[in-house]
Image (cartoon, rainbow, N blue to C red):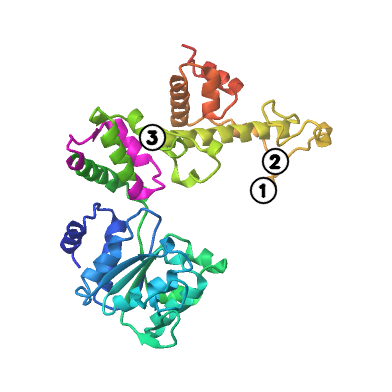
Amino acid sequence: MSKVDIQQVKQRFGIVGNSPGLNRAIDIALQIAPTDISALITGESGVGKEYFPQIIHYYSRRKHGQYIAVNCGAIPEGTIDSELFGHEKGSFTGALSERKGYFEVADGGTIFLDEVGELPMSTQARLLRILETGEFIKVGSSKVQKTNVRIVAATNLNVRQAIADGRFREDLYYRLNTVGIHIPPLRERTEDILLLFRKFAGDFAEKYRMPAVRLTEDAQKVLTVYYWPGNIRQLRNVTEQISVIETDREVSGEMLKQYLPEDKVEKLPAVFKGDKDQNRTFSNEREILYQVLFDMRKEINELKELFHGIVRGNMPQNVSDEFYPAEDPRLNQPVPQVVVNHPEKHDIMDADVFEEEENKSLEDVEKEMILKALERNGGRRKNAARDLKISERTLYRKIKEYKLEE
């Protein structure tokens, strides 16, 4: 379908955003809607997976039939079969009358099985039978019944890992996943974050009859670099809290951070899931780049000093004991010269080849990072060194080298 059609779908279902990943997911949903094939919608919790089975149902030939959404994770294991397939009177304690299940009620329509990965293995086997033959048996009955239901399922689980762990049937996965639709997490839709915030702010302003909150420029940066582990659901909750609690309708970055978990504010996605003390917070994307360059420069310098020490027969003062313990007997032995076997020459490698002039831009970056760290820490060098992950001695040397004493 055309982009105009996709925009119409967004307006009809209240979907906000223009990211390529979101548009691709909607496009796939529209393409498979006229067919009867099953679909598996994947994505993290809170990304809005529940909209896509509605899109598929609305644009299908079943649009006038029943649409039933079932949260499989919210139904106790002991009653899930009765809920889905129905039961006969007296089939178990409390079964005082016959009951129709969702698959019988939704005959001719669509069933959305949310959190399908939470289904017990026995229920998965029953579901597989419906997918393959359209047949099911009520709890406590021996009569086979038929149903004509389209199944759309969703999960936030890593299904392949669940299969490997024996928690999900592989044959069921392939039957459900005839077509897969992946909904990207909010952190991969940075162009949509501010749009969503404004939408939610307007909604809550109308709901609570108050002016809508606005974000300052620094607050917008905080919002767009945050990792959003709870995705759209978390953003909506944060917007509602700010709308209700804050008396000032203009929200600054510092105010916004009070509503975000500190250990997840402004993180690089690549290192976000590492150890907490290894993660660093940054005020903007430019500073992230500076820090990466600074770390690279530091590692290059350490390698140079280490090589100097090996070639000249002594170890540099600032080499960590973690790599060269003082009690290592090898440090008391003569260190051989390093010889490079080059096809054309066999000279002893001269350590001075590493004494090339430093890249000017890296010096500027290093200088700026030091100034930023000192500014953030009110000029306290000890704290600045800890922030930069370097020793105080190295920081003092760099301050003197760049004439930053003032």
For image coordinates 43% across by 59% down, the residue present is 156
- Callout 1–callout 3 Cβ contact below 8 Å: no
Q: Residues within 10 Å of mark 2 (few under 14, many from 20)?
A: few
Q: Which residue is mark 1?
A: 342
Q: Which residue is mark 2?
A: 347
- Callout 1–callout 2 Cβ contact below 8 Å: yes
**Residue type at tag 2:** Asp
**Residue type at tag 3:** Arg
For the residues marked 1 and 3, what is the alpha-carbon distance in whole angstroms? 41 Å
In the image, which residues are magenta? Answer: 206-234
Residue 249 counted in the magenta span: no
Question: Mark on residue 65?
Answer: none
For image coordinates 59% across by 21% down, the residue present is 392
Q: Which residue is mark 3?
A: 286
Q: Left or right: where does residue 299 sit relative to residue 40?
A: right
Q: Left or right: where does residue 261 sit relative to residue 243?
A: right
Of 193 and 126, the residue lying toward us: 126
Which residue is farthest top?
406
